[in-house]
Structure formats: C-alpha cells, structure tokens
Image: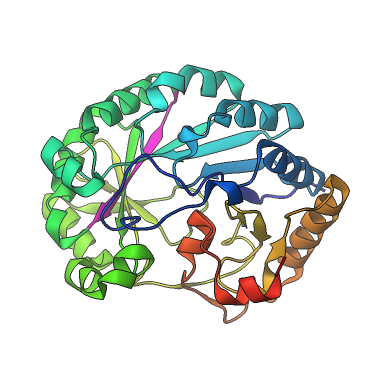
C-alpha cells in the first residue's frame, strides 16, 4: 500500500569538496559503497513497500559516474518524486538530463557568496560553478532551495543571502542551518563547535533586523524547519535548528526511511535498534526487509520520543557506530 515516506539514500560517502565543518580528515573507503545494483534493488524494494519518493544525498551524489542512470532507473521503477541535495559543482553539466530522467526537486548547499570565503570554507575555488548551477536550476524548476550553514565566522551571510537571492522573485527558498557537533570537526577539535555555533534564535534575530517576519508553511521532510516572509522582501527564508531544538517524533513528522552509503537501512536515524543490514541480500530478502521497516514505522509508539540527531557520520558517510559493527559483523 502506498505511503507518504521518503527513501533518503546516501549514494556515496565521497565528496569533491572538503568543508571545514564536515569532512576535513575522514578517509572514505569506496569499496564499501553500495553498487549500482544494490541501489536499484533498494529502489525496487522501496516501491514494493509503497514508497514513491526518493531523496538523493551523500557525500556528493553527482560525483557517482552512474548517478544519471540511478535517477532514470528510479523513474522507470515507479518513483514519482525525486529530490537531490548537492553542492552544485557538477550539477549544471547534467541538469537537463536529471530533469528529463525524473528529478523533481533540488537543494543546493552554499555557505558564502564571496569567492575567497567560499574557497576557505570548502577548500575549492568553485563559487562561480555553484552560481551557474543555481541559475540553471531556476530555469528548470518553479522553486529551488538553498541550504546555508551559519557560523560565528560567517553570520553576515544571512543578510547577504537574503539580499542576493531576493532578486530571483521568490523562486529561491533560502534556509539557514545550525552546525552540529559531529564528524571530523568535532572529533579533532571540539572547540570549533563551541566557538562557531549560532543558534536558531540568533539567526531569527538577524532576520528580524532586516524586516518583520511572517510565518509561512512549507511542507517538507524536515519538520523542525520554519519559514518566513520578510517585510519588503519577495522570497521565503527559513531556519533549521539542527542542534538547539529537538522535536517529538510522530508518523507525520518523521517521513524518512534512511539509507547509509554502505547499505544499512532504518526507519529511525536516532534509535539504532531499528537498523537493518541490506548487504549481501537477494532482492526478495530486501523487499521483505523494506516491508518490515515500513510496517514497523507505522506502528511505532512515538510518544515522548525526542528527535536529536547523533549519527550524521553514519547515515551520510557510512562511519558505522560500534553498536552496528558488533550487531552486523560479517
């Protein structure tokens, strides 16, 4: 039976950027990544379990040589909505093909509008490529989204982003994100998070300095996010409290079925007891596992369960927690 869940697949732990708050020293092992067939099987299993929406993430999905084939295959299987989160470096080269093959929504990650700052944050001089990709996406879609991580070092980006993207006449939604205490940044230098963290309230105060805020509803897969119109501006601007605010899960607020780049799947990214191992399984076994995951998600008791993400590195980059290593030893 069809449901409203989204299969959020991290198709690779690799990335063509080296952002300071994300992945500065991690060494990924490409041999542990899911193959094209692994992902195709997951799509088929999801469709059989009633899932019709897929969100492609990573790492950076567009660096996979077979990414276009995966998007096309998802559409052929019956997936009706496909979204992509990308850094935009390569997107413009494959934008039209992605649209033709079934991509319906796109989110860009962008943390600076100044070339030198962008290079310092991302480790690559690529801002011009990202802007080209954004312009291309605006031509192809009615609305796109920009995700911007805000830190103490770049807090001025809030005003800069609003001024810059407001000229797109409401076709660009900008969402400002809190950084989270995870990954290489936190493991090697915990003071970075403490020194650089900017809360949701601080972001909102900066937005209020620009103009009066009027809340608007945008339905998506991140229920913690809130969005606003700013008096005197044409666009929509939001905030996502990755760290400072938790929310109590329920079936409507938790639509994701999450897939790690090395083949683990779960209906909950917080409680590792729900994780299943899809590695080295037949298609039939994967279909049954996916149906179990969906059934379990529907009947779970969400009351009093506070959602605060702890396992970003697992779901995005395949860095398996000790509990998973022990539970699913090969």
Residue 237: give x, y in percent of width and height: 29, 47
Q: Is residue 241 visible?
A: no
Q: Nearer the viewer, residue 250 or 19?
A: 19
Query: Residue placed at 43% from the left, 26% from the top?
Result: 142
Q: Horizontal and vertical percent for residue 45?
A: 78, 46
> Given the current orientation, which residue lies at the most extreme right position?
284
Q: Is residue 148 shown in magenta?
A: yes
Q: Is residue 113 magenta?
A: no
State whether residue 193 appears in this view. yes
Choose top left, top right, bottom left or bottom right for residue 324: bottom right
Residue found at x 67% / y 49%: 4
Taken as a whole, is the magenta stretch helix, strand or loop? Answer: strand
From the viewer's perspective, tell me whether residue 233 is left or right of residue 93: left
Which residues lie in the magenta part? Answer: 141-150
Where residue 279 appears, x then y in whole percent? Answer: 73, 55
Tell me if residue 128 comes above or below residue 293 in the rendering: above
The quadrant of the image that shows the C terminus is bottom right
Q: Please name the colour scheme applied to the rendered image.
A: rainbow
At x 39%, y 57%, the residue is 26
**Total numbered circles:** 0
Q: Residue at x 16, y 48 (%)?
A: 157
Where in the figure is residue 118, as x and y percent of width and height?
Answer: 19, 42
Residue found at the very far bottom of the displayed protein: 304
Is 56 on the left or on the right of 113, as rendered?
A: right
């Amino acid at each position: 039976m069809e449901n409203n869940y989204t299969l959020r697949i991290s198709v690779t732990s690799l990335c063509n950027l080296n952002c300071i708050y994300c992945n500065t020293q991690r060494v990924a092992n490409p041999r542990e990544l899911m193959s094209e067939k692994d992902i195709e099987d997951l799509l088929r299993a999801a469709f059989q379990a009633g899932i019709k929406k897929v969100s492609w993430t990573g790492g950076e999905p567009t660096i996979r040589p077979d990414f276009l084939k995966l998007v096309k295959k998802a559409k052929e299987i019956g997936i009706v909505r496909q979204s992509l989160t990308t850094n935009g470096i390569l997107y413009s080269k494959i934008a039209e093909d992605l649209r033709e093959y079934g991509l319906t929504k796109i989110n860009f990650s962008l943390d600076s509008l100044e070339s030198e700052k962008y290079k310092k944050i991302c480790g690559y001089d690529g801002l011009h490529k990202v802007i080209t990709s954004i312009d291309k996406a605006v031509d192809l879609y009615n609305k796109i989204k920009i995700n911007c991580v805000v830190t103490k070092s770049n807090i001025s980006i809030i005003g800069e982003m609003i001024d810059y993207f407001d000229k797109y006449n409401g076709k660009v939604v900008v969402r400002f994100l809190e950084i989270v205490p995870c990954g290489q940044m936190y493991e090697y230098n915990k003071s970075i998070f403490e020194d650089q963290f900017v809360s949701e309230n601080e972001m909102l105060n900066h937005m209020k300095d620009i103009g009066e805020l009027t809340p608007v509803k945008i339905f998506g897969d991140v229920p913690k996010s809130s969005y606003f119109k700013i008096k005197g501006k044409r666009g929509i601007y939001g905030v996502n409290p990755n760290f400072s605010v938790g929310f109590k899960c329920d079936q409507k607020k938790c639509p994701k079925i999450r897939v790690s780049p090395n083949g683990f799947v779960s209906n909950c990214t917080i409680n590792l007891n729900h994780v299943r191992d899809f590695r080295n399984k037949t298609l039939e076994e994967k279909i049954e596992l996916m149906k179990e995951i969906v059934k379990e998600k529907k009947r779970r008791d969400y009351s009093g369960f506070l959602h605060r993400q702890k396992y970003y590195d697992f779901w995005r980059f395949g860095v398996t927690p000790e509990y998973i290593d022990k539970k699913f030893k090969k």
